């Protein structure tokens, strides 16, 4: 037990509470997986943040969710591994480093590959340090002894192993295909690295002349600059308009190239003129048509988006400048006869924002169909499948995997995993292997690197030591229990981890994938630099503390939904933390010298003691069940209500009667209940708010070094007490009723008034008499009469609670017209409740399908509502006489 017991400062200051606490956890090694054979393993691998900058609110949300889960599981007795790490983020990081070099007046080409990579590693170290400091501020319980990086030697070995195995199996191949090309970063992109945006555009309608004829054939395009690479015009074989032209020659304007008119089923007869220009080097569909008809592939652009020698007089122009010049020339020649304004979807690079160019290039690809088929088959088995939470996202996964295309994995970068392929300088032979060829002087390694997602797809098992299948961590902690990530990277990452895990581990990488949405601003807009509506999580922590931010993130949404950021809600969570602080401070001040061994819950418990212990049981059950289902919002709200409404507002106030009294036995019993409830409540709150709960728990009577490794609360059947709950509910209802009545006639609590309580039977009279001290303390009566069938005074305010009526004789203070109006409103309320419950009980579908306990509960409600309705009716009748 801490020497600082009973010494909480008067004011809650999150910066003081959180300072140094993380180091205390690290020094105690509380976050390190223990490989304890007595405990069941539980593992999560962190979605590795990119070393491109500081973490944003989305990272804070994602990692706080993981931390909440792992803290809870650790307390539940699991041997928890939460493995940290970071991603090298190929294109994104290289772009950042190149921008920095540009500011310094140099470039990667001037530095050369080796020096550039040195600069990239320096960048990585700098930003990895930033990220770790942010993890610390958030309080993340990561096992740093196992931290990994996607370019570390172990993961690099795993990447080489996977590449070579897939190549040897015929699932990796090299070929010339149309790929997505980013002219800004000069690298290939996979399909899912392309963001499509609808922008204003133009359709350019042209007439290509038929050779040796006065006829023309009409085509349209959105990218006229690519016509310089046209090698055919295609029509549908059944299109009667063009039967006579199939096989004839068409002349490509400007260029003068002779091209054939081919028939192909791909062409849509209903779209436009029914004829399409074919540019095999600049369009994926044209590429396929070109293959079928053995067409030449004419590439007209350079890698940087400028036109090449095949573009003739337009050589050297930027592609968009070329478009302007070409359109002007085509108009002058009379070829271009219409420019139609029409918005269309244009692909942009996710990384650079540049307009993506479909581009003929020699690249490395993964053959996806067999890998996807195997992964999808795994979903047929409940024991093998990955459970999507919420379940609806499994459909998103299926849709992508069912329609998957081969994955372009090569990137024209220097920062990343170099492709383990070498080309013989003389024979041109390709060698693929984990090791460099022996006669290395005769071989040249592929210049390209692998797509970042290739290495991160292996993350759940490569981080645990694979390909060493004897790795202790791999055997114990793989597959992992849950992956927490945003629904926006199901395609990018989740699916790839699943099919790679199935291929190399023959099982799922994680049992569940818990998917959350995006964090948006208060108006529901996506946070972005252009809108200037982003919020730095570190700024939130500096102002309100990590606990307030964490609690807001964990309780502000349901699985799969987006979350709106409101500063007001952060402030309200700070108010909650402050409420917890003040309640704990009061409790601790009244536990002077009280030790863990002094806690005794077997004494003479009051109804308030029995009630709070019973409600604690219900809270433990509710919080545990919902948190285990990842319903953290529901768990957090229930816990919030228990702490604020029941423990702070009612139990602590009632506990003051004993604490300020003379009976030492009662004092010790109350201290025991306070200590126990506060201890158990702090444990439940700990995964949400780790800093404040550790601070409070350390000063409570306790056993153990830290709340992080204390035992998760369990329901204690001995504390279940429905009678105490019922009694307390009635007391609270009476006290609230008296307070409300006083407020209506502006009679302050400090002024004593006469109170009469008419109970429906003698048993209820005895119950209320037993708790008279609470009624006197919180209602402040000049006299309090409790009896059966008390006649209502002529001039009094009346209220109804279950089993009793309360009369406040307030002659001279009450407006009887207003009292009648109030009672009529109350009657309307009970009329509605009676109608609702009777409608439910008359529904045979409900009666036959609902559990018996639920039906009985509704019947009890009907009885209660009818009783209250009758009492209000009777009182109204009396007042109206």
Image: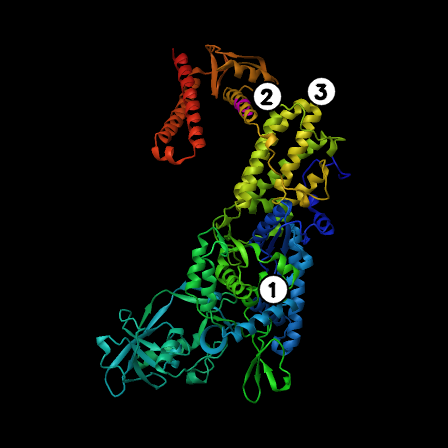
Which residue is at a point 61% across and 25% down the rendered structure image?
608
x, y percent for residue 604: 66, 23
Q: Quadrant of residue 462?
A: bottom right
Asked if the stretch drawn in magenta spans residue 731, the answer is yes
Kindly identify which residue carries mark 3: 663
Pointer 2 with pointer 1, Cβ within 8 A? no
Magenta residue check for 428: no
The residues tagged by marks 3 and 1 sit, at their Cα atoms, a distance apart of 64 Å
Q: Residues within 10 Å of mark 2 (few under 14, many from 20)?
A: some
Task: Decide if residue 313 is in sight here.
Answer: no
* Percent coordinates x, y for residue 815 in the rendering: 45, 16
Q: Is residue 4 left or right of residue 773?
A: right
**Relative to 358, is 344 above or below?**
above
Residue labelled with disc 1:
462
Q: Which residues are magenta?
A: 728-733
**Magenta stretch, overall SS:** helix
Residue 428, placed above or below residue 270: below
Q: Where is residue 468? Give x, y as percent.
A: 63, 66
- Write down the residue under mark 2: 778
Q: Residue at x 44, y 23 (%)?
A: 864
What SS does tag 2 mark?
helix
Q: Earlier in the sequence, mark 3 or mark 2?
A: 3
Instruction: Say what secondary structure mark 1 lies in.
Output: helix
The residue located at (34%, 32%) in the rendering is: 843
Specify whether residue 223 is in view: yes
Q: The N terminus is located in which quarter?
A: top right
Q: Is 251 rendered above or below residue 523?
A: below
Q: Earlier in the sequence, mark 3 or mark 1?
A: 1
């Amino acid at each position: 037990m801490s020497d600082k017991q009973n010494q909480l400062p008067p004011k809650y200051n999150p910066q003081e509470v959180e300072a140094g606490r993380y180091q205390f956890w690290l020094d105690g090694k509380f976050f390190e997986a223990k490989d304890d054979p007595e405990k069941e393993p539980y593992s999560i691998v962190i979605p590795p943040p990119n070393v491109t900058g500081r973490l944003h609110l989305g990272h804070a949300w994602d990692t706080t969710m993981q931390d909440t889960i792992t803290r809870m599981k650790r307390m539940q007795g699991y041997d928890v591994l939460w493995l940290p790490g970071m991603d090298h983020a190929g294109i994104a990081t290289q772009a950042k480093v190149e921008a920095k070099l540009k500011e310094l007046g140099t470039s990667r080409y001037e530095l050369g590959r080796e020096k550039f990579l040195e600069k990239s590693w320096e960048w990585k170290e700098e930003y990895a340090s930033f990220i770790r400091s942010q993890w610390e501020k958030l309080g993340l319980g990561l096992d740093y002894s196992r931290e990994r990086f996607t370019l570390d030697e172990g993961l690099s070995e795993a990447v080489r192993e996977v590449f070579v195995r897939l190549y040897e199996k015929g699932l990796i191949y090299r070929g010339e295909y149309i790929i997505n090309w980013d002219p800004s970063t000069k690298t290939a992109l996979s399909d899912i690295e392309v963001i499509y945006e609808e922008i204003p555009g133009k359709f350019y309608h042209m007439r290509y002349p038929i050779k040796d004829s006065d006829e023309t054939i009409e085509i349209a395009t959105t990218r006229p600059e690519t016509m310089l690479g046209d090698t055919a015009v295609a029509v549908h074989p059944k299109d009667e308009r063009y039967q006579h032209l199939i096989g004839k020659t068409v002349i490509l304007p400007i260029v003068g190239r002779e091209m054939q008119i081919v028939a192909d089923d791909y062409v849509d007869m209903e779209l436009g003129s029914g004829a399409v220009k074919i540019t095999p080097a600049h369009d994926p569909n044209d590429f396929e048509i070109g293959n079928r008809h053995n067409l030449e592939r004419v590439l007209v652009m350079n890698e940087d988006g400028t036109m090449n020698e095949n573009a003739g007089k337009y050589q050297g122009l930027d592609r968009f400048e070329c478009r302007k010049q070409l359109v002007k020339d085509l108009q002058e020649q009379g070829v271009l006869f219409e420019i139609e304004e029409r918005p269309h979807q244009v692909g942009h690079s996710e990384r650079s924002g540049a307009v993506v160019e479909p581009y003929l290039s020699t690249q490395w690809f993964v053959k996806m169909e067999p890998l996807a088929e195997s992964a999808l088959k795994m979903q047929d088995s409940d024991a093998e499948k990955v459970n999507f939470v919420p379940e609806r996202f499994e459909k998103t996964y299926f849709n992508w995997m069912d329609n998957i295309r081969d994955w372009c994995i090569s990137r024209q970068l220097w920062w990343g995993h170099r492709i383990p392929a070498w080309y013989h300088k003389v024979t041109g032979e390709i060698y693929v292997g984990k090791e460099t060829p022996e006669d290395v002087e005769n071989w040249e390694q592929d210049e390209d690197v692998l797509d970042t997602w290739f290495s991160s797809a292996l993350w759940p098992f490569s981080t645990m030591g694979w390909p060493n299948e004897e790795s202790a961590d791999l055997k114990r902690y793989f597959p992992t229990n849950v992956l927490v990530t945003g629904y926006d990277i199901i395609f990018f990452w989740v699916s790839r981890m699943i099919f790679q895990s199935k291929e190399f581990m023959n099982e799922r990488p994680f049992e569940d994938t818990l998917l959350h949405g995006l964090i948006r601003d208060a108006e529901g807009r996506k946070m972005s630099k252009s809108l200037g509506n982003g919020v730095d999580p570190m700024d939130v922590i500096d102002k309100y503390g990590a606990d307030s931010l964490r609690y807001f993130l964990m309780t502000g949404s349901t699985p799969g939904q987006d979350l709106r950021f409101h500063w007001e809600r952060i402030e309200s969570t700070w108010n909650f933390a402050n409420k917890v602080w003040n309640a704990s401070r009061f409790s601790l001040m009244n536990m002077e010298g009280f030790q863990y061994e002094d806690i005794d819950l077997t004494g003479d418990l009051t109804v308030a003691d029995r009630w709070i212990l019973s409600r604690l049981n219900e809270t433990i059950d509710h919080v545990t069940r919902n948190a285990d289902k990842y319903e953290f919002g529901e768990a957090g709200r229930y816990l919030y209500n228990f702490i604020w409404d029941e423990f702070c507002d009612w139990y602590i106030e009632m506990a003051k009667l004993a604490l300020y009294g003379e009976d030492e036995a009662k004092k010790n019993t109350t201290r025991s209940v306070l200590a126990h409830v506060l201890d158990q409540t702090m444990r439940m709150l700990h995964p949400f708010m780790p800093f404040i709960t550790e601070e409070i728990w350390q000063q409570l009577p306790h056993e153990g070094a830290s709340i992080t490794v204390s035992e998760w609360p369990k329901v204690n059947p001995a504390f279940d007490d429905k009678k105490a709950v019922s009694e307390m509910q009635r007391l609270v209802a009476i006290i609230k009723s008296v307070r409300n009545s006083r407020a209506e006639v502006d009679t302050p609590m400090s002024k004593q008034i006469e109170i009469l309580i008419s109970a429906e039977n003698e048993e209820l009279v005895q119950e209320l008499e037993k708790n008279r001290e609470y009624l006197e303390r919180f209602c402040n009566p000049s006299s309090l009469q409790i009896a059966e069938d008390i006649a209502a005074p002529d001039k009094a305010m009346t209220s109804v609670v279950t089993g009793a009526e309360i009369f406040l004789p307030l002659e001279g203070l009450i407006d009887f017209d207003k009292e009648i109006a109030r009672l009529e409103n109350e009657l309307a309320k009970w009329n509605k409740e009676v109608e609702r419950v009777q409608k439910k009980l008359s529904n045979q579908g409900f009666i036959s399908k609902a559990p018996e306990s639920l039906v009985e509960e509704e019947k009890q409600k009907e009885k209660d509502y009818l009783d209250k309705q009758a009492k209000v009716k009777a009182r109204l009748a009396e007042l109206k006489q």
